[in-house]
Image (cartoon, rainbow, N blue to C red):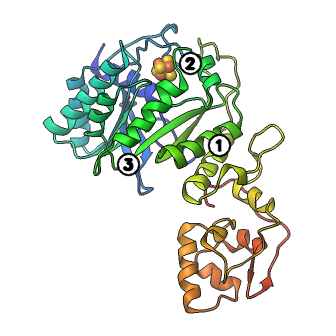
């Protein structure tokens, strides 16, 4: 197969590996001609162009939803590590990419697949002097030595969990065990990273809606992974049915569901929320039409309204329209002066239209009847 055709095939196949929420940045390749350069979010929130590609689209596993599953008939191809490293170096030199995200189907055994991915990244870093961001996907059941080698070269490591419970993993990915092949290596990856290694941490990803899981199951495991395992982020990818797979006739998951899960992930990761504070409907799903933070606040009549001049940081963080940076501005400002007006809060960055129903200033309450519940990532 021609070099460019291989890049197109293996770049297109990598679009299911998330580099940014698809409700923030599209997961389609940018129209540069190669079919493998995507927009991703950098750690500081800015976007960068990333060569997102598979080392191989062959896989010996047979996960039911996956386009790479071994029993699906399709054209297969693989890069040699030196070949892909040279290609990435050329794209960087041409100013087309700032980062490199490498995943793969499992060819042979897990560790030899991960070893080839590490070899690719090592050639790129050390022979071609690549200083850009490198994100390596680990494979289910990867060993400790392979994780340690990957940690020496990558800025970010990740391993896709795909579905949230042991039972669903066994159903959808029959060869995988959640505790043995997914949770254990994720724990090991977090624990094995030496100071200064893998600056962007360890992450994972779920395919939302593939296995009939509930949002409550996804939220519970997300909290466990963030708060107890120590992952840096949890990503979600709305399920899309792939032809010639057992799930071909299932409905695609609406992006709005993925979006609500990302909002809850932010509340758990950056706002200190716990799963018990999140509101679900009778089917254990997040209400699609309501912002999760607003739904949580409306369910907490015991907490609100809070007095802004006296509230603890954690209480301020639960007010819709107030984020972590804003909390610090409020705490600093109220050490200088007593806060008495919505205008003052607006100047400190509070989204007053969202916040006013849930706070008091100097004992005065300023409610409005129709709190905003629009779809937005701004909380
Ligand atoms: S192991 Fe990964 S690449 Fe292979 S079939 Fe399963 S989900 Fe797809």
Picture quadrant of residue 213 = top right
Q: Position of residue 308 (x, y in %)?
A: 68, 80
Which of disc 2 and disc 1 is earlier in sequence?
A: 2
359 w.r.t. 122: above or below: below
Q: Which residue is mark 2?
A: 173
Please give the label number shown on residue 200.
3
What is the CA distance from the residue labelled 1 to the residue labelled 2? 20 Å
Q: Secondary structure at mark 1?
A: helix
How many angstroms separate mark 3 from mark 2 (CA)?
Answer: 28 Å
The quadrant of the image that shows the N terminus is top left
Label 3 crowd (10 A; few <14 / some 14-19 / many >=20):
some
Residue under label 1, please give it. 219
Estimate the spatial distance between the alpha carbons at disc 3 and disc 1, rounded to whole Å: 22 Å
- Residue 25 shows in this picture: no
Instruction: Using residue 214 as the reference point, say whether residue 170 is left or right of it.
Output: left
Residue 10: tell me if it is visible: yes
Q: Is residue 101 above or below residue 375?
A: above
**Residue located 40% across and 42% down the image:** 190
Q: x, y (%) of residue 263?
A: 62, 51
Of residue 217 and residue 260, the one placed in the foreground of this image is: 217
3 or 2: tag closer to the N-terminus: 2
In this image, 27 relative to 104: left or right?
right
């Amino acid at each position: 197969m021609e070099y460019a055709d291989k890049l197109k095939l293996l770049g297109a196949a990598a679009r299911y590996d998330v580099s940014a929420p698809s409700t923030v940045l599209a997961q389609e390749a940018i129209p540069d001609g190669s079919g493998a350069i995507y927009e991703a979010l950098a750690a500081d929130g800015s976007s960068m162009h990333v060569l997102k590609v598979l080392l191989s689209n062959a896989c010996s596993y047979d996960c039911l939803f996956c386009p790479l599953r071994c029993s699906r008939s399709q054209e297969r191809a693989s890069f040699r590590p030196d070949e892909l490293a040279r290609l990435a170096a050329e794209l960087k030199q041409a100013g087309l990419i700032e980062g490199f995200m490498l995943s793969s189907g499992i060819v042979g055994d897990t560790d030899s697949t991960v070893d080839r991915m590490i070899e690719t990244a090592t050639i790129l870093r050390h022979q071609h002097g690549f200083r850009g961001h490198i994100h390596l996907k680990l494979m289910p059941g990867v060993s400790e030595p392979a994780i340690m080698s990957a940690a020496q070269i990558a800025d970010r490591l990740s391993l896709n969990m795909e579905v949230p419970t042991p039972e669903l993993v066994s159903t959808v990915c029959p060869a995988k065990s959640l505790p043995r092949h997914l949770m254990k290596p994720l724990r090991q990856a977090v624990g094995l990273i030496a100071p200064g290694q893998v600056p962007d941490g360890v992450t994972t990803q779920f395919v939302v809606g593939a296995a009939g899981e509930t949002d409550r199951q996804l939220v519970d495991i997300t909290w466990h992974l963030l708060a107890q395992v120590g992952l840096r982020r949890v990503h979600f990818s709305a399920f899309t049915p792939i032809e010639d797979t057992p799930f071909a006739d299932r409905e695609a998951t609406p992006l709005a569901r993925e979006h609500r899960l990302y909002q809850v992930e932010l509340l758990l990761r950056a706002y200190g929320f716990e799963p018990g504070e999140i509101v679900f409907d009778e089917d254990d799903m997040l209400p699609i039409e309501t912002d999760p933070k607003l739904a949580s606040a409306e369910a907490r009549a015991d907490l609100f309204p809070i007095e802004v001049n006296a509230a603890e940081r954690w209480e301020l963080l639960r007010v819709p329209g107030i984020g972590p940076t804003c909390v610090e501005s409020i705490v600093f400002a109220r050490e200088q002066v007593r806060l008495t007006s919505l205008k003052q809060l607006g100047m400190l960055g509070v989204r007053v239209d969202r916040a006013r129903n849930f706070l008091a200033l100097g004992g005065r309450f300023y409610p409005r009847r129709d709190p905003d519940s629009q779809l937005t990532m701004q909380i």
